Image: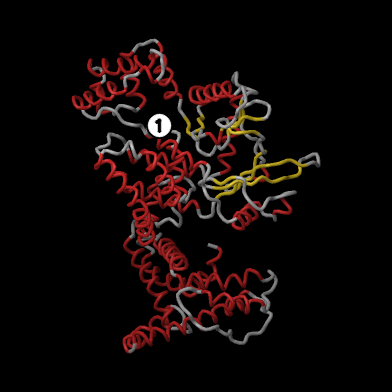
Amino acid sequence: MRRHYTLQLLALSSTTKNIHAFTLPHRRRHPNINCRLKASLSDQLSSLSYDNEFIGKLSQAAEKGLREAPSTSVHAEVKSSVVDNLPSLPQFALPTIALPEVALPIVSAAEAIETVTSVVQIYETLVDDKLSAYLGETWTTIKVQLAPVFNELIHPNLPPSVTLLIASYVTYSLFSALLSIGQEPPPSSPYPMNRYDPISARRYFDQRVVQVARRAIEVTFFSTTFLSALLGDFLTGKLEANSEKRAEELSVLLTKLGPSFIKIGQSLSIRTDLLSPAYVRGLKSLQDQVPPFNNEEARSIIENELGSSLGELFVNFPKEPVAAASLGQVYKATIRDAEGGTRDVAVKVQRPNIMNQVALDMHLIREVAPVIKRTFNLNTDFVGVVDTWGSGFIDELDYIEEALNAKSFTESIKQTPLSGVVSSPLVVDELTTRKVLTTEWVVGERLDKSEKGDVAILCSIAMNSYLTMMLETGLLHCDPHPGNLLRTTDGKLCILDWGMVTRLDSDLQLTLIEHMAHLTSADYEEVPKDLLLLGFIPEDKADLIRDSGVVETLAEIYGAWTAGGGAAAVNVNKVIADLQDLTAEKGNLFQIPPYFA
């Protein structure tokens, strides 16, 4: 928003007084209409600067010159900086524009604004000339009839072209606000509280139909080829034969679609219970092949968040990241410690504008979720699943919360027999904000790539760690892909990336423990009730859980799994046939609860 301040300043300064005048008679009946109108107008003018190629680029170019000048005064560099940037505007191939003569240096904000206004007026006058040449008498009639009204409402010196453009947005804003009387004002961001909120996101994106439609078309366009190929495999009976190829194509597709879809793919890459081995292997490439974003942007974000230059904050800061993920990227830097020495740290910086990108994608997915559920007859709360994903993704964007999660795990694990065996990286609090997370640099290697003799023991420790989190501490790490499990140089386990977690309440923990006890003791009659309490059987199917056919079928399936011998001992075809018969007789009995997705 900072880069578009110039445009908003010019527009809002000349329209705010009219908003006050417009709303005054209505205040007694609708005391919050003034706030609503201002919020709507502000959002629309912001949208103008983002969505309109011409105005947005011009605003950026003009402010670039102002921002680079010293804070105490605005020198002659403004003129050359602004003029040099103007010819790069893509939609209009206009000649270089000379600024009017002004007294330099400019020493006040008012004079600086006047200079930028002059640039806008000159440039827009040329646009006005183009419209006159293109529309002829029609444009002349429009100017004659409407220009006096617009000039009085907005600004007497702006040419009709820019006046008409701004007036259109103002008119739209006013009518939108009037139609929303009695409702809350539209939010200025998808998640005003920085927490996943699908209702606020819907109200936010309902005001940005073009942006939503553009993203929906983009997702559909990129996905069509893959979905068509998948449909062809289904019709020709080649789903299994082409699964490796399709998995690679899906990985490429998700990378093209951006961070939200990459994150979903990464989450699915560890779900061997949901995907075939071919797709699990294909999606695992998303864990290592996410492209980084621009290093200059990353450095700028770090400096803005931490309030100092990199040279002041770090002894050494590299030019390139050591790793890139769907929501951010990591640098290995060096800082000074309390004793005056140095130590290496991992600095994770969030991708720019990632919150809005994720919000838009989750909004689209949530809107089509009911359609997908009806189309494929899914007996699952698919909207709830999407909300669980969205909540996890947005929580993962709060690096302060991630730091607290890591600290909570470290403290809670100390109270268990796993103390001193498993850990998380120590957080450097003074270099951590919502968008920048700094932790100690952990020297080690990925558990799945280590060839040390204690890997099997560490895998067992990892399993015990997750069971302890699930059944005892209640804070469960939900991103256990191989890149987040390290074998340290001293042979211990370190769990990285605590952004995505889930908290299990005591009732759910107790139900999980009882379910395991029933399986261990072969008390299969209690299993259907366990599945109901755990959410794997819908509540409206509760009357079927005591049915002898259900108990018998589940007892046979669980018995085969717990008898030993691994997957080879299970007759998969018979299990599938039994479940299909059960579904045919009792209906779609099972679902995936949102927390399990």
Q: Residue at x 60, y 30 (%)?
A: 450
Split into 4 quadrants, where in the image is the C terminus?
Answer: top left
In the image, taking residue 228 as reference, residue 170 lies left or right, namely right
Q: Residue at x 51, y 26 (%)?
A: 466
Q: Residue at x 69, y 80 (%)?
A: 105
Label 1 sits on what residue type?
Phe
Estimate the x, y position of residue 43 in percent, counting from the top left: 44, 63
* Residue wearing tag 1: 596
Residue 30 against residue 164 in the figure, above or below: above
Estimate the x, y position of residue 210 in percent, counting from the top left: 36, 62
Chosen colour scheme = secondary structure
Estimate the x, y position of residue 196 in percent, counting from the top left: 44, 45
Numbered disc total: 1
Residue 368 against residue 17 in the figure, above or below: above
Residue 239 against residue 290 in the figure, above or below: above
Q: Please, which residue is most extreme toward the right here?
A: 340
Q: Secondary structure at mark 1?
A: helix
In the image, taking residue 323 as reference, residue 254 lies left or right, namely left
Residue nearer the viewer, 500 or 266? 266
How busy is the neighbourhood of tag 1: few (under 14 within 10 Å), some, or many (20 plus)?
Answer: few
State the image quarter where residue 45 is shown: bottom left
Estimate the x, y position of residue 188 in percent, counting from the top left: 45, 57
Q: Residue at x 66, y 36 (%)?
A: 442
